[in-house]
Image (cartoon, helix red, strand yellow):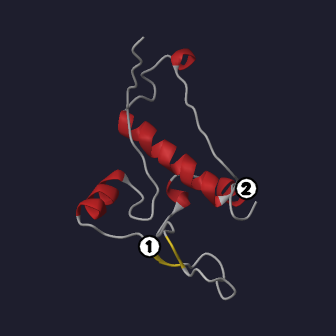
């Protein structure tokens, strides 16, 4: 049996861009998202570099109360999902009883 997937919209929060246009532009230009770690102290660590998300503004997608309540990895996921819904134009144009999303996460965030 053949299975099909339909991509209706895209969204992204990544070390090389926090929206699809910026991401594609930076990837096409060969920009690297790896830099020195800024989100926590690395003095006692051998590794000092990582691919951290930069210039992320969760307030563009979430209200302040939600931002305080959610771990950063959840803010990333929700922001990318909101971008994908907006990109798709699907909101208000689909039977919600026939719509689903699967999300998987291996672990929680750095602070949880």
Tag 2 secondary structure = helix
Q: Residue at x 56, y 49 (%)?
A: 77
| Callout 1 crowding tier (Cα within 10 Å): few <14, some 14–19, many ≥20 | few
Query: In the rendered view, does 111 fall on the left or right side of 88?
Result: right
Q: Which residue lies under the disc numbered 1?
A: 34
| Callout 2 crowding tier (Cα within 10 Å): few <14, some 14–19, many ≥20 | few
Query: In the rendered view, does 43 fall on the left or right side of 6?
Result: right
In the image, is residue 1 above or below residue 23? above
Whole-angstrom CA distance, mark 1 to mark 2, is: 28 Å
Image spot of residue 97 (x, y percent): 57, 16
The quadrant of the image that shows the N terminus is top left
Image spot of residue 8 (x, y percent): 37, 31
Image spot of residue 74 (x, y percent): 63, 52
The quadrant of the image that shows the C terminus is bottom right
Q: Residue at x 43, y 41 (%)?
A: 84
Q: Are marks 1 and 2 in contact (CB under 8 Å)?
A: no
Q: Which mark is residue 70?
A: none
> In terms of depth relative to the viewer, which is nearer, 61 or 70?
70
Q: Residue at x 39, y 14 (%)?
A: 2
Of badges 1 and 2, nearer the viewer stands: 1
Q: Residue furthest bottom?
A: 43
Occupied quadrant, residue 65: bottom right
Image spot of residue 11 (x, y percent): 42, 46
Q: Which residue lies under the disc numbered 2?
A: 69
In the image, is residue 71 above or below residue 2? below
Q: Is residue 7 visible in the rendered structure shown here? A: yes
Q: Residue at x 29, y 61 (%)?
A: 27
Q: Is residue 63 visible in the rendered structure shown here? A: no
């Amino acid at each position: 049996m053949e299975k099909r997937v339909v991509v209706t919209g895209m969204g992204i929060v990544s070390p090389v861009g926090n929206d699809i246009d910026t991401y594609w532009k930076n990837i096409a230009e060969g920009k690297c998202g790896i830099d020195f770690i800024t989100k926590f102290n690395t003095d006692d660590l051998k590794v000092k570099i990582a691919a951290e998300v930069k210039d992320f503004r969760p307030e563009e997608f979430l209200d302040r109360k939600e931002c305080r309540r959610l771990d950063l990895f959840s803010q990333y996921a929700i922001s990318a999902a909101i971008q994908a819904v907006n990109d798709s134009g699907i909101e208000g144009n689909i039977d919600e009883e026939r719509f689903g999303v699967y999300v998987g996460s291996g672990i929680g965030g750095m602070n949880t």
